[in-house]
Amino acid sequence: MKIIFVGPSLHRDLAFLRRRQDDIVWAGPARCGDIARAARSGVTAIALVDGLFDQSAAPWHKEVLYALSLGLPVAGGASMGALRAAECAAFGMTGIGTIYQRYASGEIVDDAEVAQLHAPEELNYLPLTEPLVNVEPTLSLLDRQGAVHAATVQSLAAAARQIHYSERTYAEMIRRSADLDPEEAQTAGEWLQSNAVDQKRMDALEVLDWLRAQPDREPSPAHAWDFQETTQWMQLLHAVKSE
């Protein structure tokens, strides 16, 4: 059995995918301990897309290294998965998608670029705000298509950078771009509603394709590094074992 940690990045697809892909464990966004727990549960591959970081501790890099040390294939992309993959690629974690590539190349470095407010599991992790990794390609497309003036795009981009991730929506970006005339604001709003780029979703679907392609077989450890069992790690592992 394989497992994927995913939530808002695949919100619109989750209900359908859960029905059609019953050979995968559909876990929600990962929190501290979840990857270690999965690695000990007998899964044959782990995919990390979304993770929690505000209301609970985020999954540790050490958990990824632990899974890799057991010989488990681990991949990430789209959101926190892209972050962890960029940080753990040297140890064998597979990074997937455009957002991962941007982190791996150093084009973006801030964790906040993927931060996004979302609803709970009962509402399929409905995204409530827009992460910068979606906003930036959306505004680039808006600029290329010329639906509004270049100055309007620049004003929206500046507003997006000034808004906290928990409040950033396209409507709020327009509202905070005080220099937009009403006609430009309306045109931008209509265009964004119909054409916004969801880069997180595209990358998450690539991660899912990777997971589907992984064979269900026993892991075979093979790496050129030693996993160091620190005191903090042993405490986390003890907590996971005690559950």
Image (spheres, rainbow, N blue to C red):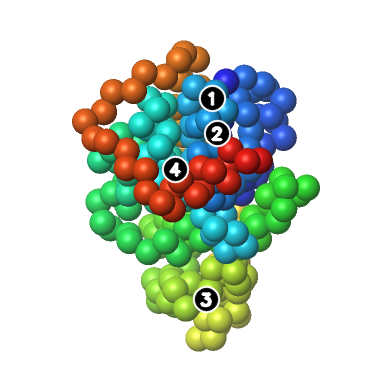
> Disc 2 marks which residue?
38
Residue at the spot x=51%, y=48% of the render?
A: 236
Question: Circle 4 sits in a helix, a strand or a loop, which is it?
Answer: helix
Say which label, 3 or 2, has the lower sequence index: 2
The mark nearer the N terminus, 2 or 1, is 2
In the image, taking residue 20 as reference, residue 149 lies left or right, namely left
Which amino acid lies under the numbered mark 3 shown in the image of this protein?
Ile
Distance from the alpha carbon under mark 2 to that under mark 1: 6 Å
Vertical arrangement, residue 18 with respect to residue 174, above or below: above
Which mark is on residue 63?
4
Q: Quadrant of residue 170?
A: bottom right
Q: CA distance from mark 1 to mark 4?
A: 14 Å
Mark 1 neighbour density, 10 Å: few (under 14) some (14–19) many (20 or more)? many
The extreme right residue here reads 122
- Residue 226 appears at what percent x and percent y? 27, 36
Left or right of residue 231, residue 44 in this image: right
Q: Amino acid at mark 1?
A: Val
Q: Which one is earlier in the sequence, the residue at label 1 or at label 4?
A: 1
Label 2: state its secondary structure. Answer: helix
Of residue 51 and residue 15, the one placed in the foreground of this image is 51
What residue do we see at 50% from left, 86% from top?
A: 179
Residue beneath label 3, please? 163
Circle 4: is it few (<14), some (14-19), or many (20+) Cα within 10 Å?
Answer: many
> Which of the 4 quarters of the picture holds residue 167?
bottom right
Q: Nearer the viewer, mark 3 or mark 4?
A: 4
